[in-house]
Amino acid sequence: MAKAKRKEVWVFFGELLKERRETAGLSRNELGARVFVSGTYIGLFEQGVRKPQLDVAQRIDEVLQTGGIFERTCRDLINASPYASYFYEVAELEAVATKICEFAPTVVPGLLQTAEYARAVTVAANPFVTEEYIEEKVSSRLERQAILQDATRPEYWVILHENAVLTPVGGPAAMARQLDHIAAMMRQRRVLVTVLPRAIGAHAHMTGTLKLMEFNDQPPTAYTETEFTGTLLDDPAVVKQAQRTYDLLRVATLSPEASLALIESAAEDFRRCASTT
């Protein structure tokens, strides 16, 4: 399902939700209390700004006695998404975020990956899939990067662990081009990247990736991901804790200038390695 079509369906979802809620004589706050989210979130669902997770859609069906229409719509949209079920809402939120902060402990974030790098990561995790599957995954990842080209692009902050800089994903030549791409984005001021040195040892977030997102018209969110799943976090206390963790990581990184120098030096090392093989 094309992105524009998915957006239309979410708008329909929101309009139908508002209609059924008002027919039931419930305010946004009243419905929110019954499905365990805030009235503000119900409003964002109705505007098509936020997409409810599947369990929330199921509870809405129960409360409004809609025969499962919201659950079915939600499942259809999740299944039509090129992303994993736990990531589809995150991809939608990236597109409306005003600020994105990421910590990447082992792999360059999707928003910064080259096609070569994305392909190598996809093949490594899925060695028996079809070429069509790989191309779809790579294309969807590159499509997400369009948000960094817009005039209204979000502030994008990235902390790369040095492991992500020095691991030759796709081989030395491909990794050199990946690091060149990051360096170019830094020099164009499209992203602010700092590197967390390996020598730092233990750090504030030792398991998985961390992504923080801020918005104009809704509360901030946090997203954590490990090898097999991811979790979108909305609870204000948990998001605040995640923001503190990111702050602790940031103070342990190299300066932007030193980080750029390290990235460009690593790219040159990979280039030399590629030329001798």
Image (cartoon, helix red, strand yellow):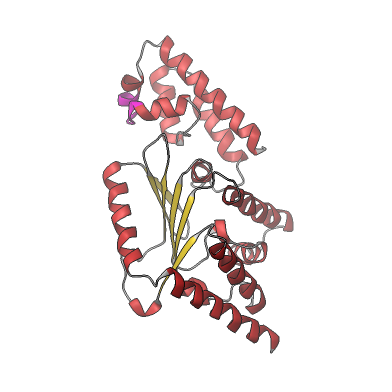
**Magenta segment includes 33:** yes
Residue extent of the magenta highlight: 32-39
Q: Is residue 232 left or right of residue 6?
A: left
Image quarter of residue 110: bottom right
Q: Is residue 210 left or right of residue 118?
A: left
Q: Check the picture and name the quadrant holding the C terminus.
A: bottom right
Closer to the camera in the image, 167 or 264: 264
Image position, residue 249 (x, y; %)? 34, 65
Image position, residue 200 (x, y; %)? 34, 76
Give the residue furthest to the bottom: 276
Image position, residue 114 (x, y; %)? 63, 63
Give the residue furthest to the right: 131
Q: Is residue 231 above or below residue 33?
A: below
Number of numbered labels in the structure image = 0
Task: Give the main secondary structure, helix, strand or loop, of the magenta stretch.
Answer: helix
Q: Residue at x 31, y 41 (%)?
A: 235
Q: Is residue 40 left or right of residue 125?
A: left
Residue 277 seen in this snapshot: no
Q: Check the picture and name the quadrant holding the N terminus.
A: top right
Q: Residue at x 59, y 66 (%)?
A: 184
Residue 133 seen in this snapshot: yes
**Magenta segment includes 138:** no
Q: Residue at x 46, y 34 (%)?
A: 50
Image position, residue 186 (x, y; %)? 53, 64
Closer to the camera in the image, 17 or 66: 17
Image quarter of residue 258: bottom left
Image quarter of residue 101: bottom left
Q: Residue at x 35, y 16 (%)?
A: 27
